[in-house]
Image (cartoon, grey):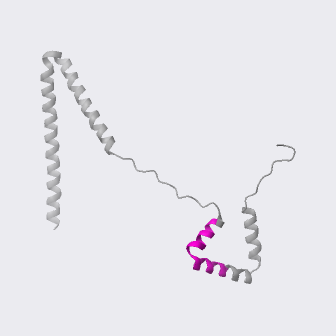
C-alpha cells in the first residue's frame, strides 16, 4: 500500500519536472527564433530588446491571468452585538422558554434566601441604564 502511494507521488513529481523542462526548452527555442527573425531588420541589440520585450509581455499576461484567478479571502464579518441586556434576555426567553423559566425560578429563590441581592441587581440596572442628557436651560 505504501509502495503504491510512493510510486504514485514519484510518478507525479517526475511528470511535473518533465513538463517544466519541456516548457523551458520551448520558451528558449521561441526566444531564439524571435531573435533570428528580428536580427536582419533590427540588428543584434534591437533583436535582443525585442526578445526581452516579448518576454516581458508574456510575463505580464501570465501575471494578469494569475491575478484574475486568485480571489482574495472574504473579510471576516463580526457578528452583530446585542444592543442591551434586556434584548439578550428576551431572545433567550423566546428561544428557550423552559430554561428562562428555570432561571427566573432560581432568581426568585435566591432573592428569598438573600434579599440583599435585589438591591445589588437594582443598583446595577440603574447604573447601566442610559441617561438622557438635557440641554441646559436658557439655550436652544
Counting from the top left corner in percent of width and height, residue 14 is at 14, 51
Q: In the image, is 71 to the left or to the right of 12? A: right
Dominant secondary structure (helix, strand or loop) of the stretch shown in magenta: helix
| Residue visible at 17% across and 48% down in the picture | 16
Q: How many marks?
A: 0
Question: Which image quarter is the C terminus in?
Answer: top right
In the picture as drawn, the residue positioned furthest to the right comes out as: 138
Q: In the image, is 80 to the left or to the right of 23? A: right
Residue nearer the viewer, 23 or 108: 108
Q: In the image, is 104 to the left or to the right of 58? A: right
Counting from the top left corner in percent of width and height, residue 120 is at 75, 71
| Residue visible at 33% across and 42% down in the picture | 68
| Residue visible at 16% across and 38% down in the picture | 24
On screen, residue 37 above or below 28:
above
On screen, residue 45 above or below 138:
above
Task: Give the extent of the magenta segment.
Answer: 87-106
Counting from the top left corner in percent of width and height, residue 2 is at 17, 66
Give the quadrant of residue 57. Answer: top left
On screen, residue 114 above or below 40:
below
Residue nearer the viewer, 127 or 99: 99
Amino acid at each position: 500500500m505504501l509502495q503504491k502511494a510512493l510510486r504514485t507521488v514519484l510518478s507525479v513529481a517526475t511528470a511535473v519536472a518533465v513538463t517544466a523542462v519541456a516548457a523551458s526548452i520551448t520558451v528558449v527555442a521561441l526566444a531564439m527564433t524571435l531573435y533570428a527573425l528580428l536580427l536582419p531588420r533590427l540588428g543584434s541589440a534591437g533583436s535582443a530588446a525585442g526578445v526581452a520585450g516579448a518576454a516581458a509581455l508574456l510575463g505580464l499576461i501570465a501575471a494578469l491571468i494569475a491575478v484574475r484567478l486568485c480571489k482574495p479571502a472574504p473579510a471576516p464579518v463580526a457578528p452583530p452585538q446585542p444592543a442591551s441586556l434586556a434584548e439578550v434576555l428576551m431572545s433567550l426567553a423566546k428561544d428557550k422558554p423552559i430554561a428562562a423559566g428555570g432561571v427566573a425560578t432560581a432568581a426568585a429563590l435566591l432573592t428569598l434566601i438573600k434579599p440583599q441581592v435585589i438591591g445589588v441587581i437594582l443598583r446595577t440596572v440603574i447604573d447601566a441604564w442610559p441617561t438622557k442628557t438635557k440641554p441646559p436651560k436658557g439655550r436652544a
